[in-house]
Image (cartoon, rainbow, N blue to C red):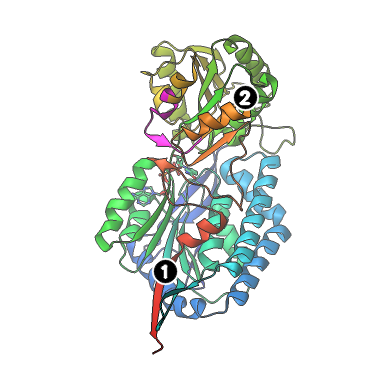
Amino acid sequence: MLKYKMLIGGEWVEALSGKTYRAINPATGEEAAEIPLAGSEDIDRAVEAAQQAFPIWSKKSQAERSDLIWKMAGLLKEHEEEINRIEVLDHGTPIKLARIQRHISSMNLEYAAQASRTLMGSALPYSAHTMSCIQREPIGVCALIIPWNSPLMMVTSKMGACLATGNTCIIKPSAIDSMVTLKLAEILSDLDIPAGVINVVTGPGGTVGESLAAHPGVRFISFTGSSETGKRIMSVASGTLKRTQMELGGKNPFIVLEDAEIKKAAQRGVASSCNNTGMVCASPGRYYVHQRIYDEFIQEYLQGMKKIKVGDPWDEQTDMGPVVSAEHRERVEGYIRSGVEEGAKLLLGGKRPDQPPLDKGYFVMPAVFSEVRPHMKIYCEEIFGPVACFTRFSSDDEVIDMANDNIYGLCASVWTQDTARGMRLVERINAGVVAINSDRFVSSETPWGGFKESGFGKENSVFGLEEYTQLKLLVMDNN
Ligand code: NAD
C-alpha cells in the first residue's frame, strides 16, 4: 500500500497527532494508500508557513513567478504516466479520460503563467494636480479547497491563478481522493519554489477544511464543492471577513428545440452525461425536449447510451468507470429509487453490474428516465452521477420558465438550427454560462462560474486571475 505525507513549509510531514486514514480504489473497493489525517494544529503550522513565504513570493518579479509556473506545466507532462496511474487508482478515472485531464491541467498552468504577465493597472486622471493609479496586489494566504470530482484539473486551475498573482496557498483536497494532489506537490518539489509557497493538508472537510476556513491568517478562500458546504464555509469565514469565491452545484438545463440536429444533440448529451461517470458540475441535469421530437430524441439517446462501455478504468476501450465511493454510489442509487417511486419511467440502466471484475468496485450502469416531472426529487436536485432525466415541453416560454425554476444557475445549453431563436432563449436563462449547440463550456481562457446557489466569482480566464488580487488606489499630488 502507498504511504503519503503532507507538504507543510517545504517539509514532508505526518499529522502532528500521527493519525492517518485509508484511500480506497473505487474500481475494486480495495485500500490503496495511507494518508495523514490533519488536525487544527497542522492547519496552524501550514498557515504560518504560507504567511512566512508570502513576502518572499509576492516580491518576486512577475517574470520569475510565471517562469516557475510554466515549468510546473512541463513537469506535469514529464510525469504524465505517474500522474495518470494515481488518478486511475484514486478516482477510478478511465485512463483515456485521465490523459485528457492531465493535458488540460498543464494548459491551466501555462495559461496562468502567460496571462498573469498581462494583468495591468491603470492611471486615473481625475484632476489636473493629482495623479492616481490603480495597482493590483496579491491578497495573501489563500485556502484552495478542492472537490473529489476532477482533482487535478481543479487544483491546477486554482493553484496556477493563485501563485501567478503572487499569493501563497494551502491546498486541501477532498479526503476521498487526495492522492493526485499529493503526487502533484511531490513532482513540483523538483522546482526552486520557496518553502511554504505551496502547502498541502489532508483530511475531512468538517474538521480540516473548517479549521482552514476559520483561520484568521487565511485571507481568501477559493472553494469548489457542493452548495451546502459553500454556505457553511461562508458562515465560518465571515468571522474574519475573508473574501471567498464559490464554484458550487448545478442542475443544468439541456434544451432541445424541435428543429435541432437530433443526432448531434443526442450524441453530445450522452457524452456529457457519462463524462467522469456524470460527476461533473456542468453535466446536463435536466433534459427538456420539445414534444414534437420527444420520442425520436429519446430513441436516439438510448441508442447512444447503450454504446457506452462501462468497465475497468485501465481498459483503453472504457468510456465510464465507477463512481468515486461506496457512499456516493448509495446516494446515486437513492435518487434512482426515488425516481421510480415518484413515477418517472426508468428506460435504461440504474443497476449495479454483477459480473466480475465490475462486481467489486462502485459501478452503476447509466440510467435514463423519461416523464420526469417538476415535483420529483430527480428533477430538482443535483444527482452528480450518470442519470439522465427527460421532461417534455411545448413552447419557448414554458421551457424558459422551467429552466429558471431551480435554485441553481450554473450553465445551460440550447440545441437548435435557428441560432437567432437560440440566442433569444439563452439570453433569458439565469445562469453563468450559456451555449447554443455546444456543451463544451470550460477552458483555461474562458470564465467559468455560476449564478444563484451555483455560487459567485470566476474560475479560469483573466477574470479568474483577478479573483486572487485586490485593487489598491494610489494618489499623488503633483502640484
Ligand atoms: P463537498 O462540498 O462535499 O466537498 C468539497 C471540498 O470541501 C472537500 O475538500 C471537502 O473535504 C471540503 N469540505 C467539506 N465540508 C467542509 C467544511 N465544513 N468546511 C470546509 N471544507 C469542507 O463537495 P464534493 O462532494 O467533493 O464535490 C461535489 C460537488 O462539487 C457537487 O455539488 C458539484 O456540483 C460541485 N462542483 C462544482 C464545480 C463548479 O465549478 N461549479 C466543479 C466541480 C464540482
Which residue is most to the front?
128
Residue 360's disc number: none
As helix, strand or loop, the secondary structure at mark 2 comes to: loop
Q: Where is residue 39 in the image (x, y as percent from the top left)?
A: 35, 60
Q: Residues within 10 Å of mark 1 (few under 14, many from 20)?
A: few
- Residue 402 magenta: yes
Instruction: Answer above or below: position of 266 versus 464.
Output: above
Which residue is labeled 2 in the image? 416
Where in the figure is residue 160, as x and y percent of width and height?
56, 62
Please state the quadrant of the image where ligand 1 appears: top left
Instruction: Look at label 2 and name its amino acid.
Output: Thr
- Residue at 64% across / 22% down in the picture? 266
Give the spatial CA distance, label 2 vs label 1. 42 Å
- Per the image, the residue denoted by label 1 is 471
Q: Give the range drawn in magenta.
A: 401-411
Residue 51 drawn in magenta: no
Residue farthest to the bottom, as pictured? 479
Tell me the element at label 1.
strand
